[in-house]
Image (spheres, rainbow, N blue to C red):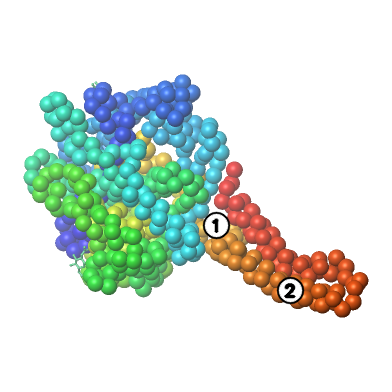
Amino acid sequence: MWSPLLITGFVACFAAPSHQQFPRRCATREALLSGECCPAWQEGDGSACGASSGRGFCVDVDVDVEPARPDGPQYPFSGLDDREKWPLAFFNRTCRCAGNFMGVACGDCKFGHFGPSCGGRRESVRRNVLHLSRAERRRLVSYLNLAKSTVSADYVLPTATRREMTEEMEDGADPRFADASLYDVHVWTHYYVSRAALLGGPGNVWTDVDFAHWAPGFLPWHRLYLLRWESDIRKLTGDDGFAFPYWDWRDAGGCDVCTDELMGARSPRDPDLLSPGSVFSSWKVICSRPGDYNDRGVLCDASQEGPLLRNPGNHNRNVVPRLPTSAEVDFTLGLRDYDTGPMDRTANMSFRNTMEGFGDPQTGFGNSSRMGMHAALHVFMNGTMSSVQGSANDPIFLLHHTFIDSLYEQWLRRHQPSPSEYPDSGAPIGHNGEYNMVPFLPLYKNREFFLSSKELGYDYSSLLDTNQQLAESMTPYLEQLQEVWPWLMLVGLLGASVPVLMAVAVMVTRRYYRSPSRWSTRKWRNLFALPEREPLILAGDKEEEAAAHRSYQTAI
Ligand SMILES: *[C@@H]1O[C@H](CO)[C@@H](O)[C@H](O)[C@H]1NC(C)=O
Ligand SMILES: *[C@@H]1O[C@H](CO)[C@@H](O)[C@H](O)[C@H]1NC(C)=O
Ligand SMILES: *[C@@H]1O[C@H](CO)[C@@H](O)[C@H](O)[C@H]1NC(C)=O
Ligand SMILES: *[C@@H]1O[C@H](CO)[C@@H](O)[C@H](O)[C@H]1NC(C)=O
């Protein structure tokens, strides 16, 4: 649970959410025994890492074992947890991709790049969820639902530790990996990165460890996490323009995205559940019971654990008095230092710690007994969102973390830190600059995501300049216009038909009474001209605005 235990100084229940995911093609006995995860570029030349095309090469994994750059003192073990020196417990050789190539076999392009040789640049725009048109809202919900119901083609989840896998393989069995939906692969990733360390046997766990929270890696890790999730949804739907929207919760009185059109309203029958009018009410959660896994000393096995729980505002108000205010956000963004002191929950005047929630957003002092900013939202939701490990089960997680990422981006743009301001050493385990982020394969380092979103191919509508913002704010209206366009046309035609019928009647009458008539074709044309001109103007405007839209969305 996020809140009450924290105050008393216990962190057991907070076992960091961890997300362990494995490329299906490396989740084999052979790959584990050889320690090599260098799959063939199947969609391309068929060589390992696309080496024949120069896309990448199979190389020894680079883990930062420099004694001059030790981890902080918070985690006092070594050689016990599969996440230490990631990914050495599983693999010591992986693909290193050249140029703009990326991916487990170097078959993809780096974020923000596209094309056969990944030479194209593309910038997507993440927008305020409350500014989306109705069609865009429907699309968001249906994409998420599709991800929840589609088995991931690329990834499987390990349900045993590396040690257990070794024993099972010695007995002749295959290592244990489970299929999961594309959405659940990401839920599991968040569980795995934040879970407790299993020290062996029931109840023997160390909970004060988290490879993605309560330390400097929090913001870079979640930046990468959202990028991968977003790109998975683009691949799944073929919609390359898709971008996660954000929920700007500053000064919100309550959960204004909790409607059936968006993340689901409250059930009229049970305040802890979602309304049957939302597709999310039928979702089942996984990896949401950290206390249970810790008692048994096992990993989450990715089985279904019941419905999503959410009861916004029913939380403990001594921990979170209200949702964060604009003034608190401004104070946080004004903190100059990315992280300070021990770089954990107790850090004072640390932008990262204050943004994450243990720094007081009015004074900047760490170890706060009240939760602010990021953590406040999790506690406020009083349900699945409120435990770190299970929180990504609730799709509100995406809207919330996209907003956190936009605040991170604002801080980066305002303070322009040099890459060396991200800590090299002394951070809690998993958080130093050169640490490979757990549990991602392919490998990414924390420092690589301590840079502006523009370099990663995306921007936020709220951070665009005024002209771009104006164009951006027009898009929902344009889309609505597109929806009603056939109707406008029909109304136009109907409107036109009245004078036409009258004219025909007049003409027929005139013809009847005096032929030959003085009617010219010009008159006919005039009659038709008016109703025809109106839709044409609309179409013209629409094209102009769509062009403006394209120009800020796609910067080549
Ligand atoms: C890589 O891992 C494999 C399998 O565990 C092992 O046999 C091999 O010796 C390792 N190589 C290095 C350089 O550590
Ligand atoms: C919900 O809030 C109550 C206090 O108001 C607390 O006791 C309970 O643990 C919270 N539940 C979750 C899931 O956060
Ligand atoms: C933070 O500041 C408080 C108050 O000055 C102090 O007691 C505490 O030791 C400081 N914490 C750290 C980690 O420096
Ligand atoms: C953090 O707060 C708890 C109690 O609120 C206290 O026992 C502990 O010493 C504090 N830690 C630091 C480093 O200030």
Q: Is residue 504 left or right of residue 196?
A: right
Choose between 351 and 326: the one closer to the eye: 326
Side of 230 relative to 209 (left or right): right
Q: Residue furthest left?
A: 202
Q: Say if 255 sits above or below 389 in the image.
A: below
Kind of element beneath mark 2? helix
Residue type indicated by callout 2:
Leu
Residue 26 in picture, x, y percent from top left: 30, 30
Choose between 4 and 541: the one closer to the eye. 541
Residue depicted at 21% across the width and 51% down the height: 304
Query: Can you identify the residue that label 2 sits on?
Result: 501
Vertical position of residue 70 compared to residue 367: above or below = above
Up the image or down, 231 lies above or below 473; here it is above
Which numbered tag is attached to residue 464?
1
Residue at mark 1: C-beta within 8 A of ligand 2: no
The amino acid at mark 1 is Leu
Foreground pick, 10 / 301: 301
Sort mark 2 into few (<14), some (14-19) or many (20+) by Cα contacts within 10 Å: few
Residue ID at (37%, 38%): 444
- What residue is at 23 percent from the left and 70 percent from the top? 270
Q: Find out if the beta carbon at label 2 lies less than 8 Å from the nearest ligand 2 atom.
A: no
- Residue 529 visible here: yes
